[in-house]
Amino acid sequence: MGFKRKYIKVIIVVVVALLLLGGGFLIGKKSAQNSSSSNVAFFNQDLGKPNSLDFSPFWQALKVLQDKYVNSDKIDYKNLLYGAIEGMTNSLGDDYTVFMKPEKTDSFMQSVNGNDSFDGVGMELGLKNKVLTVIAPLEGTPAYNAGIKAGDFILKIDGKSTEGMQTEDAVGLIRGKKGTKVVLSVMRKDFTESKDFSLVRDTIQIPVMKWEMLDNGIAYIKIYQFTSNLPDKFKDAVSGLLKNNAKKIIIDLRNDPGGYLETAVDIVSWFNPKGSIVLKEEVRGGQKGDQYVSRGYSAIADLPVVVLVNKGSASASEIMAGALRDIRGIKLVGETTFGKGSVQEVEKFKDGSSLKVTIAKWLTPSGVSINKEGLKADFEVPYTDADYNNNKDPQLDKAVELLNK
């Protein structure tokens, strides 16, 4: 069988509207797992015959709709089929196992491949305990400038309740042309009641990473997302910071929702010894899955490092942070991360639709699952609205302090 790409993002970018970037998740490559299981298998006539499941209620229901539904001439059988698949996946109760229609599949693939720009409001969404949640606003976008925060709950979109709504459906409601408006009803932990944010959609430029030199030989590296083109950009950045005689490094993973699994492994390889574990997988039945190891790029491996994280750090960000802390004892500064500890794989169908399905849970090198719990920072440092309004960054200040000791 061929190789599949795995996703560890959590999330969905609300850029062109809100493209699924990541769903907190991770993407990588690996051979398909042996799918043998004692569970009942479901088949259709193209793939085989029903096993022990009586599928007749499905066909009976379809026939009743055909024969008795009052507006039978308006039945769209493609949508009927898609609705059946969505119902099947929704019944699993897994926020990250999602059926995507062709247009959503295209948006998803564009976002994780690192496209430069989209029209939208500039934030990333996911589901947290079944509630539509802002994973991270992108810097300089309408969402960011309006004061949308990581961890905000989106209760309504243009007056429509998001209760029971899949992230992909929210994406469809929030996306739109540049210059048009969308109103989000937002609840935050310190709000006494929800607040409406009116956002004007714009063209969102999506960065991958940036770096700069701070005082005392400290290199600051900001990673926005683990896209397929990050490794090349990071390699160029390493050359640049070495030419500038960098002695210490701050890696900023705040509000980074994740991306490709292979990209996460590649970036960790600049910091961890060759052959050291980056992450472990646990597959069906609690069995051990693949184990990913560092390739051991040595150019900056001996430099002191501090990592910045917050509740918008998810998936690939958490993999990197966990691997650096477990293997090298690198300290995390900021807030507890999002808690996206699963791996998804996308199966594309011949009509252009696809199924993003959770195939494994991932563990840190020490064997810890962060799913739903996240990684707790070694130095908990809040970042308040007052800090933001006064152009202060106490989390970055703490990282600099630790490196200058």
Image (cartoon, rainbow, N blue to C red):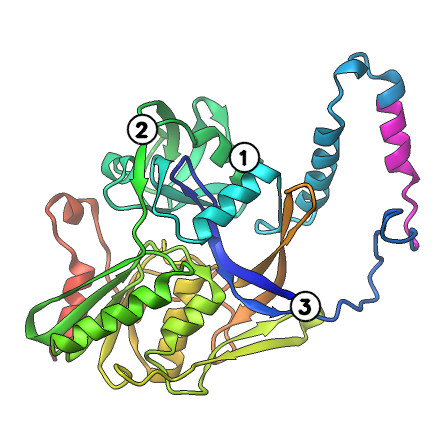
In the image, what residue type sits under mark 2? Leu
Q: Residue 199 carries which label?
A: 2
Q: Is mark 3 on a helix, strand or loop?
A: loop
Between marks 1 and 3, how big is the CA–CA gap? 29 Å
Disc 2 crowd, CA 10 A, few/some/many (<14, 14-19, 20+):
many
Per the image, is 59 magenta?
Answer: yes
Between marks 1 and 2, how big is the CA–CA gap? 18 Å
Residue 108 or 319: which is nearer the viewer?
108
Disc 3 crowd, CA 10 A, few/some/many (<14, 14-19, 20+):
few
Residue at the spot x=90%, y=43% of the render?
55
In the image, what residue type sits under mark 3? Ala
Above or below for 40 versus 264: above
Residue at the spot x=82%, y=17% of the render?
69
Q: Which residue does the numbered mark 3 point to in the structure image?
A: 32
Question: Where are the magenta residues, as a range?
Answer: 52-65
Q: Position of residue 64 (x, y in %)?
A: 88, 24
For the C terminus, give its image quadrant. Answer: bottom left
Above or below for 322 versus 298: above
> Which of the two discs, 2 and 3, sits closer to the camera?
3
Q: Is the magenta stretch mostly helix, strand or loop?
A: helix
Q: Is mark 1 on a helix, strand or loop?
A: helix
Instruction: Give the mark nearer the N terminus: 1 vs 2.
Output: 1
Q: Which residue does the numbered mark 1 point to in the structure image?
A: 169
